[in-house]
Amino acid sequence: MATTGGAAPKTNRLGLTKKEYGGVVSTMCKGCGHDRTSEAIIEAAYRNGVDPKEVIKMSGIGCSSKTPAYFLGSAFGFNGTHGRMPSFATGAHMANHVMLPIGVSGDGDTASIGMGQFVHMIRRNPNFTYVVENNGVYGLTKGQFSATADKDSPNKRGLHPTEQPIDLCALAVQLGCSFVARSFSGDKKQLIPILQAALAHEGMSFIDVISPCVTFNNHDSSTKSYTYHKEHEVHFHDPSFVPHFEHIDVEYEEGTTTEVTLHDGSRLLLTKLENAFDPTDRQKALATLETTRAKNEILTGLIHFAPGTPTLAQTLGLGDQAIADRPDDELRPPASFLDNVLGAYG
């Protein structure tokens, strides 16, 4: 007698199941916020219909930089040296700018040894989704303070940082990043649509994800803990992302809704929860970040958005064809051409 199998798994517009967006089994500590971020990236890529084989995954060194192994397993991945992920990622992007690059870094990897790389990557504005999993500590080397640790946030031994913290979102806005957002690893309702919008954005998208370290920095007095975040979050936006290939209606019971159209025609719907906040107003974004920080609050949502900012590929005139796919006669000029160049310098 014939048996009837179970229902076919749900697929996205590419005919792929969500399982095909996964990676290897995580080796993070149980309850680590980084795992929630990996799950959010999987969901965002699945919903957007991203082809994992057209993705470049980049990372540096640290707990966060291990996480690309846990999502999009069929994508090309490269784990670089400490703080140098932006250089590797920029080079890979220039060689094959038609692929979608995603970089995962940590607050130590980005805000300390990699700060110079981070700054210049923003200036160049590559088409790149840059995720920082921010827990305020060097979790891989036993919990030393990172550059994002707040002075009023002691470690488990009661010691306080001695330097002022770096607000990566404020820095990104000031440097002209065209997409800046912050979210919490445990808030998938907010984080997933932000990641969807970031993946669809043409230009650099920076997302600061508060991601508690359950081993070294999740005690009640830590400003990067689950408890502190839930008590001090200022949830400015309740976003919903609508990809350009889907036509759905989104209804909200309270507040007003602002629609932002991205370069590919996709729409980001933002419900104003607190007050009228325009993410395209750069000065208002900086002022709001400063105001909430002064009150020891954590601003989450889409903080700044600058549509139309020229990307690195546009600035360099790379065109539609990837450098990696160009024929040798275009990439290797003849000796006569080089002789002419040298001759121009006498």
Image: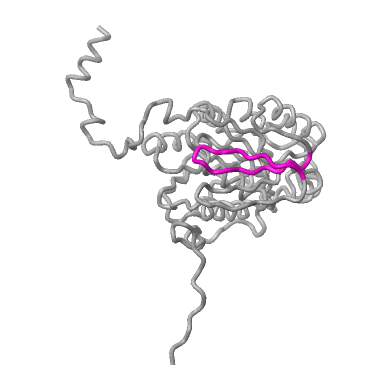
- Res. 113 image quadrant: top right
**Residue 285 counted in the magenta span:** no
Taking the image as shown, residue 83 lies to the left or right of residue 235, namely left
Residue shown at the point (53%, 50%) measured from the top left: 66
Taking the image as shown, residue 202 lies to the left or right of residue 318, namely right
- Res. 162 image quadrant: top right
Residue shown at the point (22%, 19%) measured from the top left: 338
Residue in the foreground of this view, choosing between 40 and 13: 13
Q: Percent from the top left, x then y, of residue 273?
A: 76, 43
First to last magenta residue range:
255-274
Identify the colour scheme used.
one colour
Q: Percent from the top left, x then y, of residue 160?
A: 77, 37
Does 203 appear above or below 62? above
Q: Is residue 23 visible?
A: no
Q: Is residue 8 visible?
A: yes
Residue in the foreground of this view, choosing between 42 and 226: 42
- View extreme (top): residue: 346
**Residue 272 counted in the magenta span:** yes
